[in-house]
Structures are given as structure tokens and as C-alpha cells.
């Protein structure tokens, strides 16, 4: 009888407790969710101008200007007067981020310059104009 008692005790000890493993997995999941950055889309497709040189950017704020001179930020159409406010709002989420303006080839240069000025007035000094490599 004592053998049976020993066998049942060893069988219980052989069970694997996976609770600590699940705790670690959930902590890692939360860590990656909190520290990840998501790709931002302007909401419209634009035909960008061609450039000889270009540097890849990972912008916090992405602004698109269509050939019809419409401005889009985060898939939402905004007026020129609202650009500064929207950029300041997005900048609060990522204070050290930069901005990229995607202007269509058919967009007015004056509007593009006005948008660039609005972004700089919002406090983002690092503003780039998106192009396509030659």
C-alpha cells in the first residue's frame, strides 16, 4: 500500500504548472503593444515628384496634398487653417517625432509651402517633403 501512496504523490509532482509562463507571455505582449509605433497613412494616394537623392523617414505626422489641392491628415480632410491645430494635436502623442508632407505633382507649390509653414509653426522643425527615387 505504501507503494501506491508513493506513486500517486510522484504523479502529482510531475504536472507542469504553466501559470508563470502565461504571466511572462502577457507581460511581454503588453510591453510590445505599449512600445510599438504604428504606420500612419495620410488617407489618399498621391503621385510624388521624382528626386535624385532621398533619405527614408519614419514620420510621426504624415500630411498629404492631392492634385485638387485638398489636404489630408490621418485619412481626414482638413483645411489649411486647421493644419497647425491637427499637427499640434498629433505632436502631443509623439513629441520628438518629425513630419513628412506628401504633395502630388499637380498640387500648387504655394499650398505646399503654406502647409510646410503651418507644420513648422506647430513646433516641428524637422519637416521633409516626400519624393520618389529616380
Image (cartoon, rainbow, N blue to C red):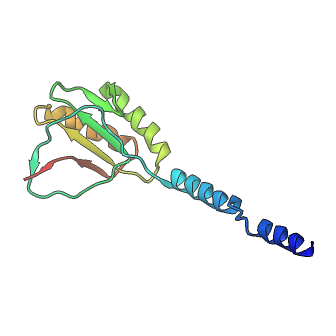
Q: Position of residue 101 (x, y in %)?
A: 25, 42
Image vertical order of residue 38 relative to residue 31, above or below: above
Q: Quadrant of the N terminus?
A: bottom right
User: Image point 10% across, 32% down: which residue?
Assistant: 106
Residue at the front extreme of this rendering: 1
Drawn side of residue 87 relative to residue 110, left or right: right
Image vertical order of residue 56 relative to residue 3, above or below: above
Drawn side of residue 54 relative to residue 19, left or right: left
Task: Give the camera-side residue of 31 and 84.
Answer: 31
User: Image point 20% across, 32% down: which residue?
Assistant: 111
Q: Quadrant of residue 64?
A: top left
Q: Position of residue 32 (x, y in %)?
A: 52, 55
Q: Quadrant of residue 67?
A: top left
Image vertical order of residue 78 relative to residue 56, above or below: above
Q: Quadrant of residue 49?
A: top left
User: Image point 24% across, 56% down: which residue?
Assistant: 56
Amino acid at each position: 500500500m505504501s507503494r501506491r501512496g508513493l506513486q500517486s504523490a510522484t504523479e502529482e509532482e510531475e504536472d507542469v504548472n504553466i501559470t508563470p509562463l502565461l504571466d511572462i507571455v502577457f507581460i511581454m505582449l503588453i510591453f510590445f503593444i505599449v512600445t510599438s509605433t504604428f504606420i500612419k497613412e495620410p488617407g489618399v494616394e498621391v503621385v510624388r515628384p521624382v528626386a535624385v537623392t532621398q533619405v527614408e523617414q519614419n514620420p510621426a505626422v504624415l500630411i498629404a496634398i492631392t492634385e485638387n489641392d485638398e489636404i489630408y491628415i490621418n485619412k481626414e480632410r482638413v483645411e489649411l487653417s486647421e493644419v497647425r491645430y491637427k499637427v499640434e494635436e498629433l505632436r502631443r502623442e509623439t513629441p520628438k517625432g518629425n513630419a513628412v508632407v506628401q504633395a502630388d505633382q499637380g498640387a500648387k507649390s504655394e499650398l505646399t509651402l503654406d502647409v510646410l509653414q503651418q507644420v513648422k509653426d506647430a513646433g516641428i522643425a524637422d519637416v521633409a517633403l516626400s519624393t520618389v527615387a529616380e
